[in-house]
Amino acid sequence: MAPSKTSKNAAAKPSAKTASAKPKAFGAKGDADALRGSIGQGGETHQRAAGSNSRLTSNQGTVISDNQNSLRQGDRGPSLLEDFILREKITHFDHERIPERIVHARGSGAHGTFQVYQSQGHVTKAAFLQDPKVKTPVFVRFSTVAGGAGSIDTARDVRGFAVKFYTSEGNFDLVGNNIPVFFIQDAMKFPDLVHSVKMEPDRGFPQAASAHDTFWDFVSLMPESMHMLTWVMSDRAIPRSYRMMEGFGVHTFRLIDAKGKASFVKFHWRPLNGSFSLVWDEAVKLGGADYDFHRRDLWEAIDAGNFPEYELAFQVFDEKFADSFDFDVLDATKLIPEELVPLQVVGKMTLNRNPDNFFAETEQVAFHPGHVVPGIDFSNDPLLQGRLFSYLDTQLIRLGGPNFHQIPINQPKCPFRNLQRDGHMQMQVPKGQVNYEPNSLDPEAPRESPTDGFVSHPDPYPVVQSDKVRGRAESFGDHYSQARQFFLSQTKPEQDHIVGAFAFELGKVSRPAIRARMLAHLNIVHKDLGAKVAEALGMEIDPALVRAFAEPKTLKPSPALSLLAKAPQTIKGRKVGVLVTEGSSAALIAAIYKAAMKEGAKVELVGPRVSGVSGDDGAELPIDHALYAAPSVVFDAVIAIPSKDGVAGLLREAAAIDWLRDAFGHLKAIGHNAAAAPLLTKAGIEVDEAVVDIEGGAGLKAFIAAAKQHRLWSREPKVRSPGD
Ligand code: HDE
């Protein structure tokens, strides 16, 4: 931001008044500090001089005269305990961090709105699902699960997809994931699961990775995890972008209509631009190239006005369907195939504003599946029931007390009043004598609303007279059939990636017995899966282990479970990287911008330097990145158009060779000119339908068509085999 007129003047010339009133305003060592003042860090100087209300103060409002030097006894003497300004500043700083989330610590947020397409009054009375004209504000936080707050974005992991709807009847939080099932059936096992996947407690590594002994030890002893594991080893766990992944409420919830009639529901989010993933080698390299790949992608898209959109869909079903379904709808390790209960698209969420402050909003937002509104209710899913306890409890420690709902990002946007009082960080100043109910002293005090307040669904689900038990229904017992169904529903490349991911992860497990147990499970899920992973690991499947489990059912494949089968052909919201050199064709660059913009994609120029590179017309090219700072993994498709002279320099640059070699290995569309030919050869690129000479023949059009396919899957067998 350009400095204001006042600040420029003032910074250049401190006022005589300030200088004379306090000759040592910038310290006895004078020169360095005075220089700092003149180049902007001492901006407060001119603020004091200007006497504006942007004067720096302590938290108590005392105006601060010197923000550069602590108080000491003489200019080389000891600092004084009396310095209340230093102590306040340092103490606040010492407390800047709050405990990070025990899971989902690494996340990125965005504001937006939700609008229903048409009234859903036939299934729910929830106010925000009635009127298509109503825009309900939302705040969304996407996250990884296992890593700490500072961990990489592209780890293989489940992604959190948590949405807070600020409805006219209170906040509704849909705290979901990008995978529709979960690892465990009962909340009792959650701390064990999380302990096993987080860094190992003695050594403090690995960070943000499930590829280690404790995780695979735990899940190999937990057959109910098998379905989720096939998902987590699939491409779903390495999404291309938060803008390009599905979301799921996971559990069965209930919708309640105005007459009190209940239906079961599963919630789904579908990104309008389609769902896409990275390939594993790309995800690994992105971990080094751009730690914040997903956070940056979301921020930049919203900042550029390219707003991510997701449709909300319901799978609505009744008790009769629930009873007829092969699996228990209360079991969070199972999904209901869309082919059995089709999705009803009910509305759209648009993310249109970045947070103003990461900590105040993204870090302090407090989600809770128990934040529901009239018209939405729970089911008896034991995992959900456990969550209903956990989320409120965790906010108490994380946000420091029971008033976290008063933090702006958590406050309902409808009126809220009750008689809860006091506690840490109470921000409200409740008035009057009455803080209890019933009372006869204050007719204006808040009271219950029997007619339109939240009433729990009476739940006629057969809770027959029974003993207290710690146990599970038999209907939760089949752990393999849906895992097999998921595997069989994938396209060939997707199946290969699942095999590759299991081989990679189990290859990192040091105890052979754990690997052997997992291979036995995978063999039950599907013989091909077991055999291929065993081959990649160079191990045999132990028949004694396999016999211990019953043979699962072979269910009809569900094509909706494959991402590739339903991927739209688009480059909307994607990035094309263009490698140029001194003397690259300005006309060709202009044509590339035009063709990409027409498709809603963004072009970024990569040059040997970040500035001072001219095109063949002599004009300086608007380079976005220097080559060493922008490997091709950060782009969806790439083009190399060096000049005839410029290519010689690239041939000596490992970064340029890798740029193309990686794009080829990651199955991306590669456009080039004739001058790039020796570079392509040196990078080992074999011409195929996604390697396009953009100057000749079908030209740019053919390149765009190739890029719209996301990746050229038929190239994959040439560059890697499953299990690599
Ligand atoms: Fe969570 N989960 N979870 N979880 N979860 C948390 O709450 C928990 C589960 C999910 O961006 C914590 O505020 C238990 C399933 C998301 O702030 C904690 C169980 C699903 C987020 C917690 C589960 C989720 C969380 C940590 C098993 C998908 C991030 C910090 C019974 C439907 C929300 C916090 C955000 C966060 C507990 C299982 C989704 C500790 C006990 C299943 C998206 O309370």
Image (cartoon, grey):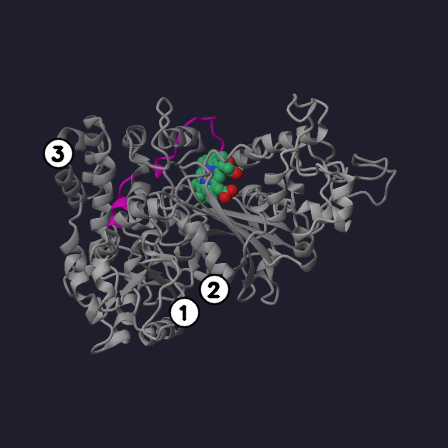
Tag 1 and tag 2, C-beta contact below 8 Å: yes
| Quadrant position of residue 579 | bottom left
Image quarter where the C terminus lies is top left
Label 3 vs label 2, nearer the camera: 2
Local packing at callout 2 (Cα closer than 10 Å; few below 14, some 14-19, many 20+) is: some
Q: What stretch is highlighted in magenta?
A: 461-488
Residue at the disc numbered 2: 306
Viewer-side residue, 20 vs 376: 20
Q: In this view, does 356 lie above or below 114?
A: above
Of labels 3 and 1, earlier in sequence is 3
Foreground residue among 317 and 366: 366
Check disc 1 and give the amino acid type.
Answer: Gly
Element assignment for label 3: loop
What amino acid is found at the position of numbered circle 2 in the picture?
A: Asn
Point out residue 640 in the picture as x, y percentages from the top left corner: 26, 65
Question: Cα distance, mark 1 to mark 2?
Answer: 9 Å
- Residue marked by disc 3: 539
